[in-house]
Image: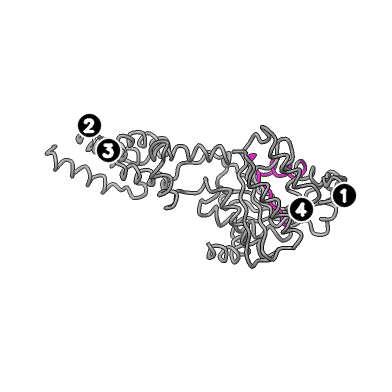
Amino acid sequence: MKKIFLLLALLCFSITSIAQVSYTEIRDANGEKRQIKVQLPRNYAANTDKAYPVIIVLDGDYLFEPVAGSVDFYSYWDEIPESIVIGLNQYGKKMDDFFLDEISGLPTEFGETFMNFVTYELFNFIDNNYRTIAHRTIVGHGESANYINFYLLQQKPFFRNYISLSPKLSTNIEKYLTERLSQEGGLTENVFYSLATSEFDRKKSKAKIVALNKKLEVVNDSLFHYSYNFYKGKTHYELVSHAIPEAIESIYKTFKPIDRKEYKEKVLTYADGTAYDYLVKKYADIKTLYGIEKRIRLNDFNAAESALRKNEEWETFELLSKLARQEYPDTMLSQYYKAQFYENSEDAEPKKAMKAYMSAYAMEEIGKLTKDKMLEYAEKIKADFGYK
C-alpha cells in the first residue's frame, strides 16, 4: 500500500496531463466570476452514450491535482468508475465562502450564498455541459473539509460521498452531525463518509477530529458507510496524498474487480448461496451504491467459475451460462459454461457438451477461451465416447 501512495504522489501531477483537463469560468448569483478546473475521463469524447459521476473538489487551486490524479489512476485500472472531476478555485475567497455564524456555527450570509452556488449555479453548469449521473462526491481539506458537512445536514443530502481531510471543525458541527445521523430514518440513501487526521496535524483540529471519530464510528445506520484514517508521522498537509487514495478505495471497495482477497474470503465461501449468487449480488450492489449499470467483468466471471469448480457446483454453470449470454452475447463464454454444465453435472450429457463446444467454436474468442481450445475439448469428448 505504501508503494501505491508513493506512486500516486508522483503521478498526481503527471497523469492529469494525459486526461482531458480544461479551465473555465462561470458566474455566481451575484454575477461574480468563479474559476473552475475540469478533468474529463480519458474516453469521454468516444463514449457519447455514457454518463458519469461528478467529484467536486473545494480548495481546487491546490487540491484538484492530487484528487484528479488519483481518480484517473484508479479509473484506468477499473477500480472506480470513470468520473468527471471539478476543482473550484477559492484562492482569496475562502473567508467569504466559508463564512459561518459565530453562535450557531452554520453557514450564513456569504457562506450560505456559496453553499447555494455549488448546489445550483455550479451544478447547472456541470449538468448542462457534461453527461452526468446524480452520484456526487465532495472533497475538502481544513476549512473546506469542515464545510462539506453542511451538505450532509440537509434532509436529502446533495452529495453521496464525503472526503474530509483534516477538517477544521466549527462550532457545534459534531453535535449537528451526530444528531443528523442518529435520527430514526434519517438517511434515505447510501452515504459514504471518509475522515482523516494525522499525528502532526494541527493540535486543536486533531483533538476535535478524534472526538468526532468516536461519535461517527458508533452510528447505527446501514446506509452510513464510514471510514477513518490516522496517519503517523504526517502533518496537516502531508496526509493529503495518503488520505485521498485510501478514501477513494474505501468508498469504491464494492465496485472494484474481484481480487484474491475477495475471492478467498467472500466468493469461495459465500454463505448465502453459490459463487454465482455472489456475482449477481455484487453487481446489484454496484447499481444500488453507485447508481451505475456495470457490465460484469470477465475477471469476475472467471472468479465465479473458479469457485464453482472448486466447490464442484456444476449444476450452477447453467445459470452462469445464461448470465454470460446476457453480458457477452457474441462471444463463446456462454456456450463454454453450458458445455461445462453438460459435461460435469450429476446427469452428465457428454454429447450435448460436445455440441456446445462446437457451437462455441463458431463464436468470438474471449479471454482465455479460444477456438483451438473449444475444438480440443470437443475432440476429447468425441474420442472418449466414440462419437462420430
Q: Which residue is mark 1?
A: 102
Instruction: Name the residue that disc number 4 marks.
Output: 169
Judging from the image, what secondary structure is the residue with disc 3 in? helix
Residue at x 41% of width, y 46% of height = 298
Q: Is residue 146 left or right of residue 384?
A: right
Q: Amino acid at mark 1?
A: Glu
Ranked by sequence position, the earlier of labels 3 and 4 is 4
For disc 4, the neighbor class at 10 Å (few under 14, some 14 to 19, many from 20) is many
**Mark 4 vs 2: CB contact within 8 A:** no
**Which residue range is magenta in the image?**
120-141
In what element is the residue under mark 4? loop
Tell me the quarter of the picture where residue 315 sits.
Answer: top left
Question: Mark 1 or mark 3, which is nearer the start of the sequence?
Answer: 1
Could one spot residue 45 in this view of the protein? no
- Does residue 112 show up magenta in the picture? no
Cβ atoms under marks 3 and 4 closer than 8 Å: no
Sequence-wise first label, 2 or 3: 3
Residue identifier under label 3: 339
Q: CA distance from mark 4 to mark 1?
A: 13 Å
Q: Nearer the viewer, mark 4 or mark 2?
A: 4
